[in-house]
Amino acid sequence: MKLAVILPAAGLGTRMLKAAPPKGLSAESSGMSRKQFMLLEGAPILVHTVRKFVASPVVHDIVVAVREDDIDWVHEMLEPETRSLFGALKVVAGGNSRQESVENALKALDPDTDLVAVHDAVRPFIELDTIRKVVEEAYTTGAAIVGIVPVDTVKQVSGAQAGGAKVRSTISRERLVLAQTPQVFRPEILRRAYELARTDNFVGTDESSLVERLDQVEISVVLGSERNIKITRPGDMDLARLFFEQEGRK
Ligand code: C5P
């Protein structure tokens, strides 16, 4: 079984930018803007994420999508990290949205790839056991994602989320999961989903939302862990440091 992992890492970190950088430093030089390159105990978050997939015995190839200007130095940085991979490391140009970045990376897959896993570059705390479980499920069914059960009560609102929202209803928690990554599919399913999205101008925030639009494809959910956080806002780095320290103590 040949599994390729796509890591979209071409984001600009606009939600990180909303926080003010330390006095006298630009967001870029303080490392606050692009979360995938922020240092966690000396190594960029992307490197920590790559290490997890290199350590997983089910992974063959890794394709990382970054901004065009970053391709060379990111390849240089990741090359020593990926020497023990069964397959190859590819660093390709991403796009203006996460969806475009993944679509570009899909074009770089070897034709004999059996399964493709897409994982946010900014989720470095993915557990090897979760990778194994979601890959096994997708191997059997063709499509599987990692999700967790929400602990908060979820409201549907009208008006802007950021201010002036009014509660309209409560969505029963029994039927909700919060989607994480990896999201794993047979390549032909993912390619069809991307083609359909392109035809319809549909933009989704994960692969599942594109695949859900295909007839006759059911996507399994494999329960993951709340430690698999997506480092998005400045405060997430404090949690990331704690999790990293705890991993080291295991
Ligand atoms: O912005 P969001 O939280 O959806 O980002 C999730 C992942 O998608 C990040 O790893 C980010 O770098 C990546 N991304 C990308 N290309 C973009 C925007 C985001 O690869 N144009």
Image (spheres, rainbow, N blue to C red):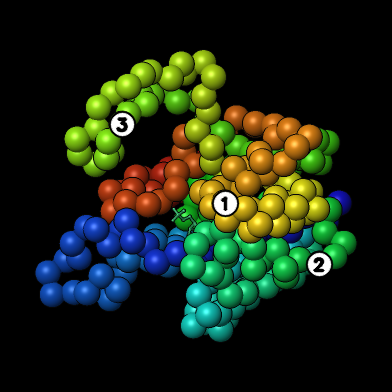
Expressed as whole percent of the image width and height from the top left, the position of residue 20 reads: 18, 62
Residue tagged 1: 202
Classify 10 Å Cα crowding around label 1: few (below 14), some (14-19), many (20 and above).
few
Q: Residue at x 46, y 38 (%)?
A: 227
Which label sits in the foreground, 1 or 2?
1
Can you say whether 75 is above or below 42 in the image? below
Task: Say whether residue 168 is visible.
Answer: yes
Expressed as whole percent of the image width and height from the top left, the position of residue 153 reads: 37, 20
Which residue is nearer to you in this view: 54 or 13?
A: 13
Can you say whether 40 is above or below 206 in the image? below
Which residue is nearer to you in this view: 208 or 54?
A: 208
Can you say whether 250 is above or below 93 in the image? above
Q: State the mark number for residue 110.
A: 2
On the picture, is 144 further left or further right than 14? Answer: right
Q: Secondary structure at mark 1?
A: loop
Q: Quadrant of residue 19?
A: bottom left
Residue tagged 3: 158
> Disc 3 residue type?
Ser
On the picture, is 28 further left or further right than 223? Answer: left
Q: Residue at x 56, y 70 (%)?
A: 94
- Whichever of labels 1 and 3 marks the residue nearer the N terminus, that label is 3
Distance in Å between CA atoms under marks 1 and 3: 22 Å
